[in-house]
Amino acid sequence: MKQTIKNMVTAAAKKAVAAGRLPSGQWPDMEIEAPKHESQGDLSTNFAMVSAAVQKMAPRQIALVLIDHMEPVGWIEKIEVAGPGFINFFLKPAAWHPVVNQVLEADERYGVSDLGKGEQVQVEFVSANPTGPLHVGHGRGAAVGDALGNILSFAGFSVSKEYYINDSGRQIRTLGTSVWFRLLAQAGREIEFPEDCYKGDYIKDLAQEVLDREGPEFLNTPEDIAIKICARYAADRILAQIRKDLADFGVKFDQWFSEQSLYDSGRVQQTIDALQKKGQVYEKDGALWFKTVDFGDEKDRVVVRSNGLTTYFASDIAYHQEKYERGFDRVIDVWGADHHGYIDRLAAAVMAMGMNREQFQVILVQLVTLLRGGKPVQMSTRAGEFVTLKDIVDEVGKDAARFMFLSRSYDSGLDFDLEVAKQKSSDNPVYYVQYVHARISGILAKAVEQHPEMNMDFRQGRHLSQLVAPEEIQLIKALAGFPEQVEKSAATCHPHVIFTCLMTLASAFHVYYNRHKVITSDATLTLARLSLVLAVKKVIRNGLSLLGVSAPDRM
RNA sequence: GCGCCUGUAGCUCAGCUGGAUAGAGCAACGGACUUCUAAUCCGUAGGCCACAGGUUCGAAUCCUGUCAGGCGCGCCA
């Protein structure tokens, strides 16, 4: 539709030049957009305004000349010049009807595009240390990463979702220490807890489990060995729980990648050797430094400490190099906003590998403030007092939680109110959208039950010319907008675009529903309307599915 | 001090690859169920788009500066 209008405008411009009414045969890119107000038509182009400089004419003049030479296609009602020089196109209802057929035919593939052209993209997200349960912040990251993966995949990218398991290094040892000392304490030993130990009930549970499993004689194990056993056991258990929590949250990963495996395979050492060979590192103060400044970082970074241990940065370089070797054209890391200071150094490392800056993208998800009835929920990770993702899913449900996390741009902080998310009311946007799906399911069920004689061929999208009510046209416009919203969402990597789009569509439906009966005594009109609402149902389902939210048939 | 994010209705936020009269939900007030689900709809009210400059036909949107809030600036992960 937009392309047709574009062609019309271009053709008119050419004719105008040929007729000597426009001075220049050059024109910049125009935009075809839906205007904000109904009085401004259905589609609009800024062609006259962007050409003003080239034509050395007032935009309105250009627009008027263009209209003179325009040969409108059949479904155009009228064309007007408005405002500073917009050319507004008013469409006949018939222009919109094919959209319903397109939705019905494409079904679960409606909105699919080839924007990505098969580009291999990896989305890495959550990647929390297996040292404790996932909390709210991880939940937002999980929702964003998972939805983004779905959306990119829908938009024609070849996507792989990955979780990087930080199962190596000091924090795992700290975990082991925490469990070991807790175990000793629970066995009645008088001990002092080290400063940086993890606290929280889950540590107590794990300590008890280790004790039950290993038996009382475990208490006599040499400390170093005991801590290792505790660490291994605890990390495995916690990781299993993380996997389960994410599965319950509707998040599936294609790949779980272990940091430890990079050490076990010698990959980290190889990476460091390679850096040395390329002269990208140097020694200072007994440590080995990566010249990240050469690639835009504000200072050089240590990869091997003076005590001989590698840094987290070192394994991250190895990991990211490994990602590109797997064939990804682009790597997207979803991080909490508190990690933004890490972007430049990793980007530098990626560029040092010979990649382009565009091939590495970090999505920073801003903080979540958890509220209950408008009051902040106090949390302290150190003290082990925090609301876990599991708590949230248990309390408000997967759908409400995901929808809430995806309702706002991740560039903004998010207030997540448990009371609101739990309410089955209009405060809670997830029901607003799901309700559309349920209502339509109800209508379709009733139609099939009441009028089996019609053979229910509304799935074919017949008699669509019956759809002329303004609310019907609005609804179809909302359907027509879905594919481009998917592309916008994918191109900007912003899942909340889909949220906004769904809210718009849901609103258009509720308005329509309140004003018109779908099932009427008029058979052809009923069939047309059934086709329309079926199309709405499909698009709602497609959109919700991108966000990982279910589309219930009854509520 | 430097860096990233944010600043839009009383509240929570969309809109930000520049476009016409800046939108939605909540909260407030007034209406609509004998009906395919009222988890809905309709109406009223609510705005120096933080502030000051600049760029141009045109700025909430882009640039510069100021102010305010959040976060980060380790041979931690």
Image (cartoon, rainbow, N blue to C red):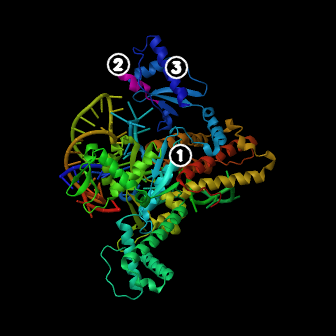
In the image, farthest residue toward the top: A19
Query: Which chain does the numbered disc 2 sit on?
Result: A
Q: Is residue A441 visible?
A: yes
In the image, the segment drawn in magenta is A45-55
For the residues bearing labels 3 and 2, Cβ distance under 8 angstroms: no
Query: Which chain does the numbered disc 1 sit on?
Result: A
Image mark for residue A153:
1
Tell me the SS state at disc 2.
loop
Q: Are marks 2 and 1 on the same chain?
A: yes
Left/right of residue A67 with respect to residue A517 in the rendered view: left
Rendered position, A446 above or below A12: below
Q: Distance between the residues labelled 1 and 3?
A: 40 Å
**Residue A424: percent from the left, percent from the top?**
55, 64
Name the quadrant containing residue A367: bottom left
Q: What residue is rendered at 32% in x and 48% in y?
A: A275
Tell me the SS state at disc 1.
helix
Q: Distance between the residues labelled 3 and 2?
A: 21 Å
Name the quadrant containing residue A470: top right
Q: What residue is rendered at 34% in x and 58% in y?
A: A312
Mark 3 sits on what residue? A70
For the residues bearing labels 1 and 3, Cβ distance under 8 angstroms: no
Q: Which of marks 1 and 3 is nearer the N terminus?
A: 3
Q: What residue is rendered at 57% in x and 28% in y?
A: A77
**Residue A388: percent from the left, percent from the top?**
45, 68
Mark 2 sits on what residue? A56
Looking at the magenta stretch, what is its main secondary structure?
A: helix
